[in-house]
Amino acid sequence: MKPLKDYSFIRGVCHGPYSAGSHEELEKVLGFAKRLMINSTRFWMSEEEWKKDPEGYKAVLRDFMETCWNYGISSMPIFWNGNFIEDFQEPTDEAWALSEAYAKDIIETFGKEEYILMWDVINEPMCNDYIRHSKGGEYEKRFSELSAYVRRLCGIVRKLDPEGCLTVGHEQVRHCVSSNDLVDVISFHDYLSTRKQIEDAVCEAEAFSRQFGKPILNTETGCVGRANPYEVELEILMRHRVGWYLFNLVSEGFWGDIHGLVYPDGTIRDPAVIAALFGFFRNRTDERIRVNVNKEGHAYKAVKAVEDALRVEETTLFMSKPKTTDEILEAAEYCVNILEAAEMVPMWNPPSARLMDYRRTPEEKRDVYEIRRFAYEMAKLVRENCMFF
């Protein structure tokens, strides 16, 4: 048996032309991707958009893929999407002919380009309401119907590009049985919620790899809204030497609140994800060292700074001079920096972001009571985490 082609080098993201905005914005985010050592992108094409204006649509695809390639990023275009199948009906001969014409045009235009890594025939063909709402014995029948549909699509693409590399991005490893014999690369998605589940999925895919003599890829993974941490996925996939595509490059739009590596301006939500991209993972062993933020007494000093800022000092009889909001925020930042550096507070809405919100507000519009409350809460958290009165 000849050795399997190795795709473990793939460090991909899901990001496509419709995510790109203007060409300038595309260049900017691809610059971020290059810094993260991303080398491939997987994206959805649209038969419907192609039908409206084939030449215009191909121009959009070309600009996107060529620009990606200028940054050392290959492309895995997806022909069709299975997510929105609600009540499956076998396509008519006319519909099949149109789908074949679409695939033929795309393949003849781009099939020989060096930036095409492989074709993803259809995304998640078994992840839709048609399968999800199966009742009783309907599941097997519906799975069989969709399997036949997937296999015919694979046949179309294979006929049009006999030498090209094909895959099908299945939502779950167990769905791969519908196309394992037809593809060149077995690919699965994984939004699982525990280390054991993630590892089991990889091992199941590896078993298919051995059985069919084909390499594997995880072509979608990473979702903070599904208890599927990017860094946990990356740690396991790297250990198994499995290439990956994270969903997705940019945190914005519909999926922005649970997906993404960078914001459009290049800032990030979770440094642990970025560290994981470079093979650095949080120490969860019994050798981890807990931070002692008060080793040099700075916790005491930070709390005292807030106490001094909140204290009303008498100037003359019946008169006092409270601290300015700038002085209160300066003291609060002393506590915030201790709390965040030692990760003693949740970072999904970091205190430092709230601090910056206050500072961006003109002095005359600031809510003094709210700012005093914020400073008090930060000092209180330092006391509680450092366990002193």
Image (cartoon, rainbow, N blue to C red):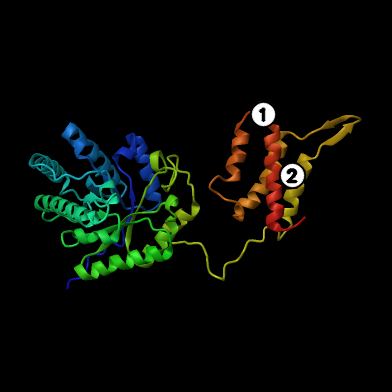
Of all residues, the one furthest to the top in this rendering is 364
Bin the neighbour count of mark 1 within 10 Å (Cα to Cα): few under 14, some 14-19, many 20 and up.
few
Q: What x and y, as percent, mark residue 371? A: 68, 37
> In the rendered image, which quarter is residue 18 located in?
top left
Q: What x and y, as percent, mark residue 358? A: 62, 35
Q: Is residue 174 above or below residue 211?
A: above
User: Which residue does the image show at 68% across and 48% down from the upper left?
Assistant: 335
- Amino acid, disc 2: Val
Of all residues, the one furthest to the right in this rendering is 317
- Give the number of the disc on residue 363: 1
Depth check: give the residue in front, 215 or 154. 154
Depth check: give the residue in front, 374 or 64. 374
Callout 1–callout 2 Cβ contact below 8 Å: no
Q: Is residue 140 above or below residue 104?
A: below
Bin the neighbour count of mark 2 within 10 Å (Cα to Cα): few under 14, some 14-19, many 20 and up.
many
Q: What x and y, as percent, mark residue 80? A: 21, 45
Q: What x and y, as percent, mark residue 373? A: 70, 40
Local secondary structure at mark 1 = helix
Quickly name the residue at label 2.
306
- Amino acid, disc 1: Glu
> Which corner quadrant holds the N terminus?
bottom left
Q: Is residue 351 above or below residue 199?
A: above
